[in-house]
Amino acid sequence: MNTAVHPAQEAVEITCADGVRLHGHFVRAHGQAPKGLPVLLCPATGVKQHYYLKFVSWLAGQGHDILVFDYRGIGLSLKGPLKHCRATLAEWGQQDQVAALEWLLARTGAEQVLLLGHSAGGQMIGLLPNHHRVARLVGVSASTGWLRGMRPSFRMKAWFGLRGVIPVGALIKGYAPTAAIGLGENLPTGVGLQWGQWCAAGGYATNAVRHHPDRDFHAQVRTPITVLHAEDDDIATPTTVADLLRTFPAAPKQAHRIKPSQHGLKSLGHIDWFRSSHQAVWPTIAAALHEQA
């Protein structure tokens, strides 16, 4: 993939409450579109921020300042050998998303931002103590990834990868070898193991705070939530999306299942939404962000 940075994309550093430093890119709104709220783009598991940069430039042209970043242990935010990284999936929400949100608020002076989360990026608002600073959450391919909610043939594949290859591979290599099974970049062991545990249990991030009610904000979230998921997505199915939305009982919420053919596309799946080859669906993402509560 071409990782050249557009001149308008400013490389930035975000410091988390625990001292971990993340790296991201900030893009100012440009073009003739009316200025909207800033957008925090939170990536999917194992997907580097550079994958989103062309979409980010396009969305900035729709009137939004935007921040995208790499979680700890991924891409530019990985410090040293992966096998030495002790990051967990829970920290991606409780530390990384929290800090990125605060950084964007401070940089733009806005009272609230829009959170655009791809897969895992849109699944952890219940771990954020500053969730009330999010005016709207749009989750693309967002769900709990609950294994029981997948069609049987894909469920077996996912179970083998998440509950077999990752734990065994982590013991041998010292990190989760997710790249070998087509699940994005290799991950820190703690991230990979929690990912498998949460998908097996259902309820996703609620598993991180099951015994820590002081850190569980799921029932308090009142941010309007919109989930966009594709008809041909094996992970974000109607069942796994519903499993996610049930964890936010007080939030206004809706889900839209998108047919790729309605956008002139042969497929859309779980990951392809932000590729330049699939930009026919980008206006649908923007429309969801602009929807009024």
Image (spheres, rainbow, N blue to C red):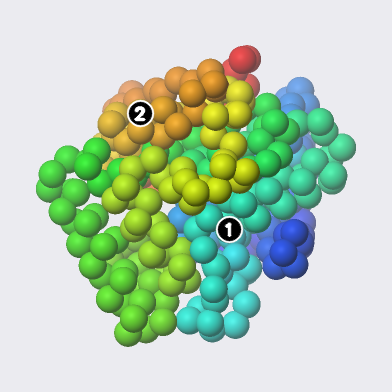
User: Neighbour class for label 2 at 10 Å: few (<14), some, many (≥20)?
Assistant: some
Residue drawn where x is 54% and y is 21% of the image: 250
Question: Which label belongs to residue 185?
Answer: none
Q: Secondary structure at mark 1?
A: helix
Asked if 22 appears above or below 136 in the picture, the reply is: below
Pointer 2 residue: 242
The amino acid marked with disc number 1 is Glu
Residue 54 percent coordinates (x, y): 58, 48
Residue 14, position in %: x, y?
75, 59
139 and 131: which is toward the camera? 131
- Verify CB contact (< 8 Å) between mark 1 and mark 2: no
User: Mark 2 falls on what kind of element?
Assistant: helix
Q: Is residue 15 visible?
A: yes
Horizontal side, residue 149 vs residue 215: left or right: left
Q: In the image as oriented, which residue stretches furthest toward the left? A: 153
CA gap, disc 1 and disc 2? 24 Å
Q: Quadrant of residue 240?
A: top left
Q: Is residue 41 above or below residue 22?
A: above
Closer to the camera, 158 or 213?
Answer: 213
Residue 1 is situated, as x and y percent measured from the top left of the image, at: 48, 63
Residue drawn 58% across and 50% down? 93
Q: Is residue 28 above or below residue 260?
A: below
Q: Is residue 165 left or right of residue 252?
A: left
Task: Give the x, y percent position of residue 128.
Answer: 63, 43
Q: Earlier in the sequence, mark 1 or mark 2?
A: 1
Q: How many marks?
A: 2
Which part of the image, by quadrant, shows the C terminus? Answer: top right
Of the residues shown, which amino acid type is indicated by label 2?
A: Ala
The residue identified by callout 1 is 91
